[in-house]
């Protein structure tokens, strides 16, 4: 389960729609399974099929989370024109088993959350809007 405040849930969707047709991406800051903040990131690929974070922004994001006494608990990105599920590439790059991965499909209007274990098995995680 991941608990997301309503305004942050809305911001993921807004960010995804704003960046369309490019994939939007960012981090969710929180403790355990509760999200407290969102950090919009730059997709340096500027692609509609994949995203890459800017390493400098990643470092700043981590510093910001720690300054709040929290962690980066989830990565979100959008799928402009494909369903809200982990692509082969998403699974390949999902190397942190403690991280949750959210995907918002702009074409479907759906937000889903996943975790990926060491064997690259994908499990859907329930989203609770709080
Ligand atoms: Zn993806």
Image (spheres, rainbow, N blue to C red):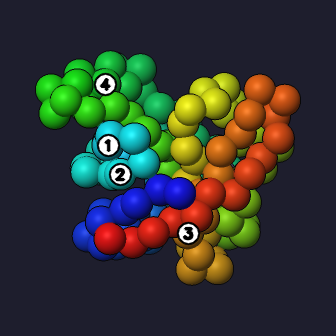
Above-or-below relation of 49 to 120: below
Image check: 25 left or right of 85?
Answer: left
Q: Disc 2 on helix, strand or loop?
A: strand
Q: CA distance from mark 3 to mark 1?
A: 18 Å
Residue behind mark 3: 111
Residue behind mark 2: 34
| Crowding at mark 1 (Cα within 10 Å: few <14, some 14-19, many 20+) | many
Q: Disc 1 on helix, strand or loop?
A: strand
Q: Which mark lies nearer to you, 3 or 2?
A: 2
Image check: 66 left or right of 90?
Answer: left
Is there a contact, CB below 8 Å, between mark 1 and mark 2? Answer: yes
Q: CA distance from mark 3 to mark 2?
A: 17 Å
How far from the left and from the top, in percent, is residue 99?
A: 54, 36
Q: Nearer the viewer, residue 122 or 14?
A: 122
**Residue at left 74%, top 51%?**
123
| Crowding at mark 3 (Cα within 10 Å: few <14, some 14-19, many 20+) | many
Q: CA distance from mark 1 to mark 2?
A: 5 Å
Q: Earlier in the sequence, mark 4 or mark 2?
A: 2
Residue behind mark 4: 62
Above-or-below relation of 31 to 67: below
Residue behind mark 1: 30
Q: CA distance from mark 3 to mark 4?
A: 24 Å
Q: Disc 4 on helix, strand or loop?
A: helix
Q: Earlier in the sequence, mark 3 or mark 2?
A: 2
How far from the left and from the top, in percent, is residue 5?
A: 30, 66
Q: Quadrant of the C terminus?
A: bottom left
The part of the image, by quadrant, that contains residue 32 is: top left
Image check: 21 left or right of 60?
Answer: right
């Amino acid at each position: 389960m991941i608990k997301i405040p309503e305004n942050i849930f809305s911001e993921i969707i807004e960010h995804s729609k704003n960046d369309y047709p490019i994939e939007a991406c960012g981090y969710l800051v929180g403790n355990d399974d509760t999200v407290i903040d969102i950090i919009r990131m730059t997709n340096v690929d500027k692609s509609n099929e994949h995203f890459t974070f800017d390493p400098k922004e990643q470092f700043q994001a981590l510093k910001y989370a720690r300054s709040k006494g929290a962690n980066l608990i989830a990565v979100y990105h959008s799928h402009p024109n494909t369903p809200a599920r982990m692509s082969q590439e998403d699974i390949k790059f999902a190397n942190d088993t403690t991280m949750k991965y959210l995907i918002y499909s702009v074409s479907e209007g759906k937000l889903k959350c996943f975790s990926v274990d060491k064997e690259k098995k994908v499990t859907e995680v329930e989203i609770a809007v709080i």
